[in-house]
């Protein structure tokens, strides 16, 4: 049974750095084809992909946020950490982490098949 | 702005069929996955790849693709299918993910 849970501050001030931790169980992030991603959703708005780290430590970021994001993994602790610098009120959102599975042969893609419950982060002074 | 465009809202009568579309250049090369999200809940994967349903997803959900458009079809919509639906795929630069703008499905 795969589960993921996000943790971190619920309130951050503008210009601060946000650090979120995804703690998971039921899979290993050293297994080929597995990844963990972060997705956010501002209140009443659409989903936005942020970052993804693969089993082989390959890291990918949303082009629009790449300069502000860092994703890391601790396989022994079953955790993935996302940091986002220079927070702004527009970054107020529910932040989700999700398990990703890679598929395809010639053309490789992945999908998010298990999601955490999400954590609401508010940016306000 | 998203590279995957969806109609903001569609409605369907109970038991009828509804098609939700997702348009984007990257869909000429990559498959879309589809996510259902009900209010206050995390998204749930309903379709991935050519037309694959995860375990537990009813077979009334199906996916298809043509040109730059991917579609999610609900055949025989039920009240519990009322939700927001998001498509997802690689973007046109090959980055692993971009989400669509989302479609709100109302079952009448």
Image: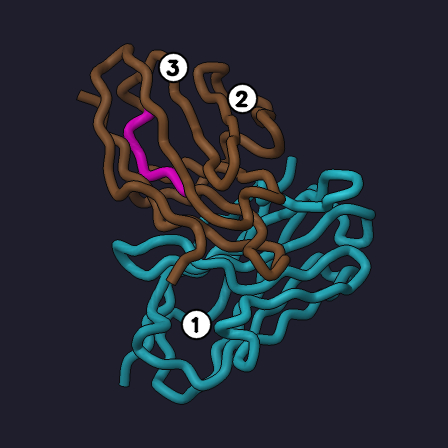
- Are the residues at dot 2 and dot 3 in contact (C-beta closer than 8 Å)? no
Furthest residue in direction bottom, as rendered: A15
Task: Tell whether label 3 touches label 1 (CB within 8 Å).
Answer: no
Q: Which mark is residue A82?
A: none
Q: Nearer the viewer, residue B23 or A29?
A: B23
Q: Would you call the spot at circle 2 few (<14 residues within 10 Å), some (14-19), or many (20 or more)? A: few
Does mark 3 fall on the same chain as mark 2? yes
- Colour of chain A, in one word, is cyan
Q: For residue A125, which quarter of the picture? A: bottom left
Residue drawn at (39%, 20%) of the image: B74
Residue B64 in the magenta stretch? The answer is no
Residue B82 colored in magenta in the image: yes
Task: Report the side of A51 relative to B59 (left or right).
Answer: right
x then y, percent, for residue A65: 50, 74
Give the position of the C terminus of chain B as an image quadrant. Answer: top left
Can you tell which of label 2 and label 3 is closer to the viewer? 3
Q: x, y percentage for residue A37?
A: 59, 57
Q: Can you tell which quarter of the image residue A95 is in?
A: bottom left
Please name the residue that numbered disc 1 is placed on. Answer: A9
Calculate the distance from the C-alpha at mark 2 to the C-alpha at mark 1.
34 Å
Which residue extends farthest left?
A: B108
Q: Check the residue under mark 3 and report the chain it is in.
A: B
Marking on residue B75: 3
Q: Report the residue marked by disc 2.
A: B56
Task: Please identify which colour was used for chain B in the image.
Answer: brown
């Amino acid at each position: 049974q795969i589960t993921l849970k996000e943790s971190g501050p619920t309130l951050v001030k503008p210009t601060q750095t946000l650090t979120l931790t995804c703690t998971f169980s039921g899979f290993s992030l050293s297994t080929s084809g597995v990844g963990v991603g972060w997705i956010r959703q501002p209140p009443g708005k659409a989903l936005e992909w942020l970052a993804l780290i693969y089993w082989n430590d390959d890291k990918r970021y949303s082009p629009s946020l790449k300069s502000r994001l860092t994703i890391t993994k601790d396989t022994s602790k079953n955790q993935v950490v996302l940091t986002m610098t220079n927070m702004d009120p527009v970054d107020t959102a529910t932040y989700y982490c999700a398990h990703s599975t890679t598929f395809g042969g010639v053309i490789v893609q992945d999908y998010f098949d298990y999601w955490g419950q999400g954590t609401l982060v508010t940016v306000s002074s | 702005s998203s590279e995957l465009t969806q109609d903001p809202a569609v409605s369907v009568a109970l038991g009828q069929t509804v098609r939700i579309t997702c348009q984007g250049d990257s869909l000429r090369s990559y498959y879309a996955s589809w996510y259902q999200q009900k209010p206050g809940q995390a998204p749930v994967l309903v379709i991935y790849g050519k037309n694959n349903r995860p375990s537990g997803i009813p077979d009334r959900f199906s996916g298809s693709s043509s040109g730059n458009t991917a579609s999610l079809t609900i055949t025989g919509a039920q009240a519990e299918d009322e939700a927001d639906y998001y498509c997802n795929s690689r973007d046109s630069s090959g980055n692993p993910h971009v989400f669509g703008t989302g479609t709100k499905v109302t079952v009448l």
